[in-house]
Amino acid sequence: MVKIIRAKYAKQPIFFIEITPTQSRWKYWPLIQQINAGLKAYCQKGKNLYFIETAQSYLNEKSEPRNELFRDDHLHLNREGYKIWGALIKNKLDEILKK
């Protein structure tokens, strides 16, 4: 994906958003954490690649998904969940793009 984007937009920043912990995918959370760590490491090594961390905002004090931020399917964010997600993404975009 990065190669395809870079072929047309060589200098544009690319942002990867951390995979959110959800109750419906909780049994896969250890694997998802590995994927997130790999994406973060990839971004740290690459030029103009950024990783937006979001997972901690969706975990409670027991490090379990905050179900109140998801719809009844425990997969998709509800309005409050999207408010948090949007703010996290906006903050990172502002931080990077306003340099």
Image: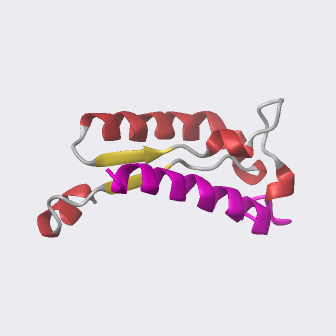
Residue farthest to the front, as pictured: 99
Q: Is residue 8 above or below residue 34?
A: below
Indicate whether residue 54 is drawn in magenta.
Answer: no
Identify which residue is drawn at 81% across, 47% down: 66
Q: Residue 63: horizontal and vertical position, in percent?
A: 77, 32
Identify which residue is drawn at 14% across, 70% down: 8
Q: Residue 40: horizontal and vertical position, in percent?
A: 41, 38
Q: Is residue 89 toward the left or the right of residue 84 in the image?
A: left
Q: Quadrant of residue 53?
A: top right
Q: Residue 71: horizontal and vertical position, in percent?
A: 81, 66
Q: Is residue 43 toward the left or the right of residue 53 in the image?
A: left
Q: The magenta stretch spans which residues?
A: 70-99
Q: Main secondary structure of the magenta part?
A: helix
Identify which residue is drawn at 56% across, 41% down: 32
Indicate whether residue 97 is drawn in magenta.
Answer: yes
Q: Residue 87: horizontal and vertical position, in percent?
A: 61, 57
Q: Is residue 26 toward the left or the right of residue 14 in the image?
A: right
Identify which residue is drawn at 70% across, 49% down: 25
Between 23 and 99, the residue placed more toward the observer is: 99
Between 71 and 83, the residue placed more toward the observer is: 83
Q: Total marks drawn?
A: 0
Between 90 and 45, the residue placed more toward the observer is: 90
Q: Quadrant of residue 80?
A: bottom right
Question: What's the image's color scheme?
Answer: secondary structure
Of the 4 image quadrants, the one containing the N terminus is bottom left
Residue farthest to the top, as pictured: 62
Q: Quadrant of residue 64?
A: top right
